[in-house]
Image (cartoon, rainbow, N blue to C red):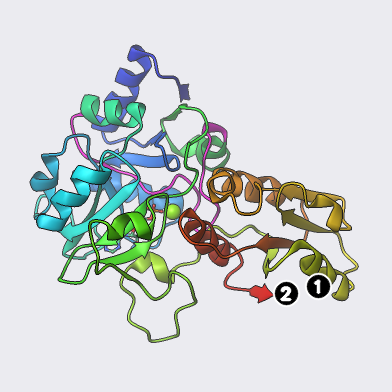
Amino acid sequence: MIWNDSEQDLRTAAEQLRQGNLVAIPTETVYGLGANALDEAAVASIFRAKGRPADNPLIVHIADLKDIETYAYPNQWAYRLAERFWPGPLTMILPKKKMIPSIVSAGLESVALRFPAHPIAQKLIRYANCPIAAPSANVSGKPSGTTAQHVLHDFEDRISGVVDGGPCACGLESTVVSLLDDNPVLLRPGFITPQQLREVLPSLLIARGVEEELQKNEVVLSPGLAHKHYAPNAETIGLLGDAESAARYIKSQCITEPYAVMCFDGEEHFYDTSVILSYGRRGDARAQGEKLFETLRVLDDKQVKRIYINAEKCDGIGLAVYNRLLRSCGFQMIRV
Ligand code: AMP
Ligand code: MG
C-alpha cells in the first residue's frame, strides 16, 4: 500500500502504527521502517523484516522537544544541541528511561533519540501518539532506501504500507552523537557536520571506525560501527583519487567480465565500460549524498560481478559520503 500526504492517508497510516504494524515513513534523511517504539512485538517485527542483528539498537523518533525528557535523561549538551539542530538530521545517544523497551536499545542502558524535520514524519508521530522506532528502510546490510519505490522493492509484502513523501532531501542517514559521558563522540557522520557540532561541543571526538576499519577485539562504541552496511551484491571496490588514475587502475586489472563504474558527474568519458553511472559532481558532497544510495541500487540491478566507485575524501558532508562508501566496499578502498 502506498499512502500520500493527504490528511486521510496520514490518519490511516498513523492508526496502523498505533496498532503495532509496520509503516515506512519519509524523513529528511532516508525512509524509516517505523513501528510503535513502546510496543515490543511491533519492534520485534522491525528486526525480523530487515533481518537486522538483534544487537543493533534502533533510533526512536519524537515530534515534541519535551519528549527528550519522557524517554531519556538529557544533559546540558543535549538541550543545546536540540536547540540548535532539532528538528533535523541529528540523533543523540542518551541514558534511557525504563519505559523504552530493551529490545529497542538492544539491551543497552542508552537510547538514540531524533526529532525529524520532515513534516510528514512529524504528523505521523503526532497522530500515532507514540514514539516511533525507525531504522533505515532497507534489508539489513543493503543500501538505504531514499524513495517509496526503494522501500516497496525491499519490503512490499512485509509492511502495512509506505507513506510517499518523494525522494529524501539529504539522502544520508542522520548524524549520530553519543552524549553518555564527559566526552561527546561522533558515532556516525551525516548532514550535520563535525564543524557544526563543534560550535556546541568543542571537545567532540570522532569514534574509531568512522573513517577506518575497526581491528578485531577493538572496543566498539556503537554496534552499527561493526556491522556490514550499504553493500551491493556485486564485489565493490573504492578508488580514491582522480578519474584518470582510477581509470588507469581499472585498465591494469585486465577484467574480462562486465563491470560497472560509479563516477563523478562529467567524468564518464575517462572509463571504458558500458555500465557507468555518476553520483554528483566531484567536490559536491551534498549532491553526492542525495544520489548515493539510489545509484548503488540501480547498479545492483545491472547484474555485474564488480563495481568500481571513484571516491574522494573531504570534510563536512563529504565525511558522511566517504563513511558510507567505505562500508559499501567493505573497506576495500584503494588509493590510486
Ligand atoms: P539506522 O537505524 O540504520 O539508521 O542506524 C542507527 C544507528 O544508530 C546504528 O548505527 C546503531 O548502532 C546506532 N545506535 C542506535 N542506538 C544506539 C545506542 N543506544 N548506542 C549506540 N549506538 C546506537
Ligand atoms: Mg541503516
Q: Which mark is residue 249?
A: 1
Name the N-terminal-most of marks 1 and 2. 1
Residue 298 in sight in this render:
yes
Q: Is residue 161 magenta?
A: no
Residue 294 in the image: above or below residue 54: above
Asked if residue 141 lies in the magenta stretch, the reply is yes
Name the side, left or right, on which 214 lies relative to 254. left
Q: Quadrant of ligand 1?
A: bottom left
Any part of residue 100 in sight:
no
Horizontal relation, residue 175 to residue 247: left or right: left
From the viewer's side, name the closer residue of 234 and 205. 205
Q: Which residues are magenta?
A: 129-149
Which amino acid lies under the numbered mark 1 shown in the image of this protein? Tyr
**Percent position of residue 297, x then y:** 64, 47
**What residue is disc 2 on?**
336
Q: How many marks?
A: 2
Residue depicted at x 48% and y 36%: 168
Q: Is residue 318 left or right of residue 333?
A: left
Farthest bottom residue in view: 217
The residue carrying pointer 2 sits among few (fewer than 14), some (14 to 19) or many (20 or more) residues within 10 Å by Cα, namely: some
Q: Secondary structure at mark 1?
A: helix
**Type of the residue with mark 2:** Val
Q: Secondary structure at mark 2?
A: loop
Q: Residues within 10 Å of mark 1 (few under 14, many from 20)?
A: some
Position in image of residue 120 (x %, y %): 35, 26
Identify the residue shown where x is 36% and y is 54%: 175
On screen, residue 35 above or below 191: above
Mark 1 vs 2: CB contact within 8 A:
yes
Q: Nearer the viewer, residue 196 or 41?
A: 196
